[in-house]
Amino acid sequence: MTKKRVLITGGAGFLGSHLCDRFIKEGYHVIAMDNLITGNLENIEHLFKLKDFEFYHHDVSKFVHVPGKLDYILHFASPASPIDYLKIPIQTLKVGSLGTHNLLGLAKAKGARMLIASTSEVYGDPLVHPQNEDYWGNVNPVGPRGCYDEAKRFQEAMTMAYHMHHGLETRIVRIFNTYGPRMRLDDGRVLPAFLSQALRGEPLSIFGNGSQTRSFCYVDDLVEGIYRLLLSDYALPVNVGNPSEITIKEFAEEICNLTGVELKVEYQPLPQDDPQKRQPDITRAKEILGWEPKVDRAEGLRKTLEYFKDKIQVPAETA
């Protein structure tokens, strides 16, 4: 039997590269596609020597062609941190709209099942806590974050339209805060920012008063949830994340304890529309996928710290 073939867009990014690893491990032929605006070939260079791995340098907001059969498409191409999508808002909107349309068309032509990477950001600054999949969200479509939030909401709507109108097999994962090796040090999200600052001996930047909450899921757990969802029979959105909620101030303390540095904080103004609460209700993932996170935050942070130590020039101790 010929191997199943999977296309992973955003394949050189943080999540996409881990998905490439997982599908190679499961015996698939993997085609990674990335325009490298935020992705990095270092994340997948260990795969280039494999006969079951291909890389296409391409922007999915332009016409997408992949020769041969495709069994699955995982659409993970998109800037995913505020520092990126605030810098390139139009490209962010295009990859969520035109890119999703192009890939749905490709899936339809190939008879492939398509999974899209949506986000907890579709809930905006939520008025319901924790957030379940039936909550419609509280999003400002014309605010600075709207380019990302609305791109993902449109992506979900387009995907469901293809599912309902064309009978295309589709899956939607709503991803909550995820961390682990291969995160970009400068991507502006709280975990790489805190780890980088702690390792350099700098004050940790806290926006607002630090009372806002996040829920962090280790990347291996997330990939397992995505893999199970792809192979499930469920077409409606599913939250995948870790419901262990923590305030940003408490998280700063955890990072300092982990790195062995004294807690020094620099408070900065809270960005517009920054969510005050973020915690997934994963009842649906438990019931439908038999999934819940296994890696606790202390273990995941230790693994992530080792990666960051290799990437950061830590200042030498003064005599």
Image (tube, rainbow, N blue to C red):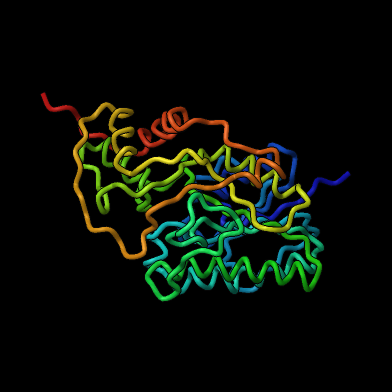
Q: Residue at x 37, y 70 (%)?
A: 144
Q: Is residue 306 above or below residue 226?
A: above
Residue 62, x across and y down, in percent: 60, 73
Can residue 122 be seen in the rendering of this structure? yes
Q: Which of the 4 image quarters holds residue 127?
A: bottom left
Residue farthest along the top direction in this orientation: 319
Residue farthest along the right direction in this orientation: 1
Residue 220, x across and y down, in percent: 57, 37
User: Foreground: 244 or 31?
Assistant: 244
Q: Residue at x 45, y 32 (%)?
A: 297
User: Foreground: 179 or 294?
Assistant: 294
User: Foreground: 253 or 276?
Assistant: 276
Q: Residue at x 78, y 65 (%)?
A: 168
Q: Is residue 189 above or below residue 264?
A: below
Q: Which of the 4 image quarters holds residue 75?
A: bottom right
Residue 287, x across and y down, in percent: 70, 42
Residue 42, x across and y down, in percent: 49, 45
Q: Quadrant of the C terminus?
A: top left
Q: Which of the 4 image quarters holds residue 25?
A: top right
Question: Seen in the image, is 226 located left or right of residue 70?
Answer: left
Q: How many numbered marks, from 0 up?
A: 0
Q: Quadrant of the N terminus?
A: top right
Q: Is residue 212 above or below residue 64?
A: above
Question: Seen in the image, is 318 located left or right of residue 186?
Answer: left
Can residue 50 be seen in the rendering of this structure? no
Residue farthest along the front direction in this orientation: 128
Q: Residue at x 43, y 35 (%)?
A: 304
